[in-house]
Image (tube, rainbow, N blue to C red):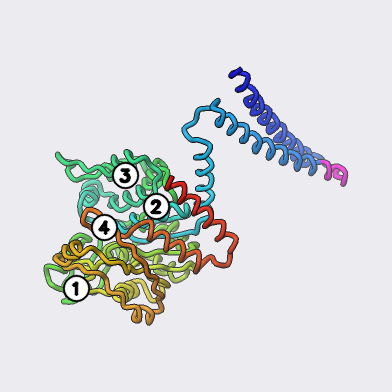
């Protein structure tokens, strides 16, 4: 009886497959006859159109009913699959949400960018992460020097942030060797370096690694040129190298006046420019102001694309000041510095943190001459930028970071409200599906 029970829905599946094939033949026959026939009359035209439409209808019915039969087999236990029908339904809802999500371009580097991306990927699959390639320290700097490749560290972190991988795979790619010649080197960096070895360029290597790890959206370097950062300080002195610039500022007891890149004519990827121009929103940061955010603005055509885009432009202000880069900076100081390097008017909104941190943690940061960034809203408004407040603090391993979920939530709400308000039906459906995903995650 068990076998007979399996045969009935199994036969139904075969029937729908055969019906689908028949519908396909209707379409093919109708198209071929319509093209080959030299004499046309209303009778024949109507007949062939009817044949093609009938074929499309039959294929549609066969696909929908066939899927129901397959799900029936799964529910009755005759087909063994890794996902239950409920999980399949949830997955479909999630995919529908991601496809309907806004087009977002995130520009930056360092830990801040990847932290934000981890939250955004649950709201949209239309994400393009444009990552700085000025890093010259740590394992990335070593590979850059030894192999002549662009620094992979920040790009690796962004790929993993957007990847749909098992925890074990992420642990593997983030693993750092503890001994030997590979000491402090990340396996993920080596993986990307190996991809670069079998690719025509670094951009292709990033694309291949993203494909392997099923990345939501796109990750790309801002340029394929060998970027070197240079800084001029307030005292007139100069320094070179991403890892050296803040250290020299502290050592010389001065502040950064202007940032430069070498080569000066470094060109951005065409895909990056196109993504910015077509975006619903462009997000700058979070990340180190001078060594993660601004270097991207100095690459040719990036700042111009920000001026041209019709998408809203959002800057995520850092929670804490950074020694050697933003000592004593307020929110308006961050924005003025971005305008100085990228041009006025490239920020519409700034997201700031109003949450408070634990006294012990605050004391630790105070010892390192780092403080909460002052929110001088009046000065910010004078720059033509609107302030959006929220509590985004997340403390982990004694470090203050943005809470990726809270940050992503306020970003999506802002984008949907300020940019896509005209499509109310889309917004209602989008947030309905968003709630479904949140419920599924809790379960």
- Look at the magenta stretch and give its main secondary structure: helix
Of pointers 1 and 3, the one earlier in the residue sequence = 3
Q: Residue at x 29, y 75 (%)?
A: 333
Mark sitting earlier along the chain (1/4): 1
* Left or right: residue 385 compared with residue 184: right
Residue that mark 1 sits on: 255
Marks 3 and 4, the one that precedes in the sequence: 3
Q: Nearer the viewer, mark 3 or mark 4?
A: 4
> Mark 3 highlights which residue?
192
Q: x, y percentage for residue 271?
A: 45, 56
The percent coordinates of residue 65 (x first, y second) are: 66, 35
Q: Quadrant of residue 13?
A: top right
**Left or right: 401 with respect to 34?**
left
Measure the C-alpha gap from mark 1 to mark 4.
Answer: 28 Å
Query: What's the distance in space between the residues labelled 3 and 2, CA to CA?
Result: 13 Å
| Whole-number angstrom distance, CA of label 1 to CA of label 3 | 35 Å
Give the label, 1 or 3, closer to the camera: 1
Closest to the camera, between mark 4 and mark 2, is 4
Q: Residue at position x 50%, y 28% from top?
A: 80
Q: Earlier in the sequence, mark 4 or mark 2?
A: 2
Secondary element under disc 3, as helix, strand or loop, is helix
Tag 1 near tag 2, CB within 8 Å: no
Residue 219's disc number: 2
The answer to whether 373 is drawn above or below residue 184 in the figure is: below
Q: Residues within 10 Å of mark 2 (few under 14, many from 20)?
A: many
Number of residues whose C-alpha sits closer than 10 Å to that of mark 3, classed few (under 14), some (14–19) or many (20 or more): many
Question: Which residues are the magenta region?
Answer: 39-47
Percent x, y of residue 358:
23, 63
| Res 330 → quadrant | bottom left
Determine whether the residue tagged by mark 2 lies in a helix, strand or loop: strand
Q: CA distance from mark 4 to mark 2?
A: 27 Å
């Amino acid at each position: 009886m068990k076998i007979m029970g399996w045969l009935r829905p199994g036969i139904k599946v075969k029937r729908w497959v055969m019906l689908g094939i028949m519908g396909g033949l209707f379409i093919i026959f109708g198209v071929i006859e319509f093209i080959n026939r030299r004499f046309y009359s209303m009778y024949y035209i109507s007949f062939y159109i009817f044949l093609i439409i009938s074929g499309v209808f039959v294929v549609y019915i066969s696909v929908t009913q066939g899927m129901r039969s397959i799900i029936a087999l799964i529910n009755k236990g005759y087909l063994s699959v890794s996902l239950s029908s409920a999980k399949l339904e949830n997955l479909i809802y999630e995919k529908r949400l991601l496809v309907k999500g806004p087009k977002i371009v995130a520009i930056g580097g360092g830990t801040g960018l990847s932290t934000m991306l981890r939250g955004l990927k649950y709201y949209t699959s239309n994400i393009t992460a444009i990552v700085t390639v000025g890093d010259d320290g740590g394992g990335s700097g070593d590979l850059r020097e030894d192999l002549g490749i662009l620094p992979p560290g920040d790009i690796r972190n962004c790929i993993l942030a957007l990847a749909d991988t098992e925890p074990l795979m992420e642990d593997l790619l983030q693993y750092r060797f503890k001994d030997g010649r590979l000491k402090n080197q990340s396996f993920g960096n080596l993986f990307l370096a190996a991809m670069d070895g079998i690719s025509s360029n670094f951009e292709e290597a990033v694309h291949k690694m993203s494909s392997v790890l099923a990345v939501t959206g796109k990750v790309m370097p801002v340029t394929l040129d060998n970027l070197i950062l240079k800084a001029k300080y307030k005292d007139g002195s100069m320094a070179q190298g991403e890892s050296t610039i803040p250290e020299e500022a502290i050592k010389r007891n001065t502040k950064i006046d202007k940032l430069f890149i070498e080569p000066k004519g470094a060109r951005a990827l065409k895909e990056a420019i196109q993504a910015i121009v077509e975006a619903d929103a462009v997000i700058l940061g979070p990340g180190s102001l001078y060594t993660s955010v601004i270097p991207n603005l100095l690459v040719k055509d990036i700042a111009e694309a920000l001026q041209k885009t019709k998408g809203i432009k959002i800057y995520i202000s850092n929670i804490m000041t950074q020694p050697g880069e933003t000592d004593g900076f307020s929110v308006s100081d961050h924005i003025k510095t971005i305008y100085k390097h990228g041009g006025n008017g490239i920020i519409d909104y700034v997201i700031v943190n109003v949450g408070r941190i634990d006294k012990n943690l605050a004391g630790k940061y105070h010892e390192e001459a780092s403080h909460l960034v002052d929110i001088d809203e009046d000065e910010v408004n004078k720059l033509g930028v609107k302030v959006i407040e929220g509590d985004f603090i997340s403390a982990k391993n004694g470090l203050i970071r943005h809470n990726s979920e809270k940050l992503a939530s306020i970003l999506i709400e802002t984008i949907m409200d300020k940019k896509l308000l005209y499509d109310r039906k889309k917004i209602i459906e989008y947030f309905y599906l968003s709630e479904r995903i949140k419920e599924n995650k809790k379960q």
